[in-house]
């Protein structure tokens, strides 16, 4: 599938966003390990900043893609509102609320930690405490919830897009995803990513 085809395919775009999120979380985890080892230097600041921006800007848009474009359409097709699948949709929305609150706490402590990274040389672990401990605790929670959340969505939810929705419905979802983003937004739209590369 080429980038242009991906941009018209909501399933592929949602998975693309998950993979971007995984890459940012991995960058944060690596940064946290380096800081723990006393190798936290200023080179980590842009890695942390990019991840925080993705969590604050792109992830809420992704959550809206799911909550506003996908979940209502799936609910409309459910025959049994008490089914396991109906419960799953509810659970996904609750995860989003929990993750949004966690992200706000994480953002605040990650900014404080990043501001303490020295311009020259590396900081000893003790120089970054207590922010480093809070950063690691918040990050561990984010990783835990996102890991199961994304697995459930990719295993139980996204495949339904191809099975349950007509091509017209899938095009409508992709159009709504575009409307949520500025015309020149690269993230979350692989077609734009290749145009600007
Ligand atoms: Fe989600
Ligand atoms: Fe998702």
Image (spheres, grey):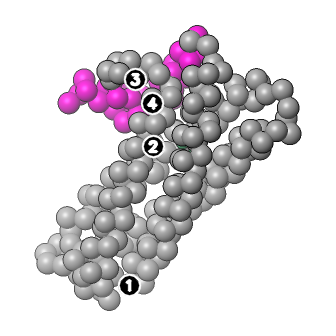
Q: Are marks 3 and 2 in contact (CB under 8 Å)?
A: no
- Residue range corresponding to the magenta coloring: 168-197
Instruction: Provide the residue designation for mark 1.
Output: 129
Residue located at (53% from left, 15% from top): 171
- The residue under label 2 is 18
Indicate which disc residue 6 carries: 3
To which quarter of the image does residue 116 belong? bottom left
Q: Horizontal and vertical percent for residue 78?
A: 79, 28
Residue visible at 51% across and 21% down in the picture: 174
Categorize mark 3 by other alpha carbons within 10 Å: few (<14), some (14-19), many (20+): some
Quarter holding the C terminus is top left
Q: Nearer the viewer, residue 107 or 161?
A: 161
* Disc 4 secondary structure class: helix
**CB at disc 3 and ligand 2 closer than 8 Å:** no
Image x and y of residue 110, in percent: 40, 67
Q: Would you place residue 62 above or below residue 192 in this image?
A: below
* Label 2 CB-ligand 2 distance < 8 A: yes
The nearer-to-camera label among 3 and 1 is 3
Q: Earlier in the sequence, mark 4 or mark 3?
A: 3
x and y, in percent, of residue 19 in the image: 40, 43
- Which residue bears the numbered disc 4? 13
Give me the C-alpha separation between circle 2 and circle 1: 31 Å
> What whole-number distance in Å separates the C-alpha atoms at marks 3 and 2?
14 Å
- How far, Cα to Cα, is label 1 from label 4? 38 Å
Q: Nearer the viewer, mark 2 or mark 1?
A: 2
4 and 3 marks in contact (CB < 8 Å): yes
Q: Residue 167 placed where, x, y %?
A: 56, 12
* Residue 104 showing in the rendered view: no
Residue furthest toward the bottom? 126
Residue extending farthest top:
168
Corner quadrant of residue 120: bottom left
């Amino acid at each position: 599938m080429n980038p242009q085809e991906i941009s018209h395919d909501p399933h592929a775009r949602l998975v693309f966003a998950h993979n971007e999120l995984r890459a940012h979380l991995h960058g944060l985890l690596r940064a946290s390990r380096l800081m723990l080892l006393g190798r936290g230097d200023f080179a980590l600041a842009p890695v942390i900043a990019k991840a925080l921006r993705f969590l604050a800007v792109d992830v809420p848009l992704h959550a809206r893609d799911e909550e506003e474009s996908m979940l209502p359409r799936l609910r409309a097709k459910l025959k049994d509102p008490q089914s396991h699948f109906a419960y799953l949709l509810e659970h996904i929305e609750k995860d989003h609320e929990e993750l949004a609150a966690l992200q706000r706490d994480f953002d605040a402590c990650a900014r404080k930690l990043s501001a303490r990274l020295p311009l020259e040389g590396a900081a000893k672990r003790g120089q970054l405490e207590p922010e480093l401990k809070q950063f690691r605790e918040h990050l561990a929670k984010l990783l835990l919830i996102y890991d199961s959340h994304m697995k459930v969505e990719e295993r139980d939810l996204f495949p339904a897009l191809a099975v349950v929705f007509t091509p017209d419905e899938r095009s409508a979802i992709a159009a709504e995803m575009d409307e949520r983003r500025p015309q020149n937004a690269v993230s979350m739209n692989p077609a734009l990513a290749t145009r600007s590369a």
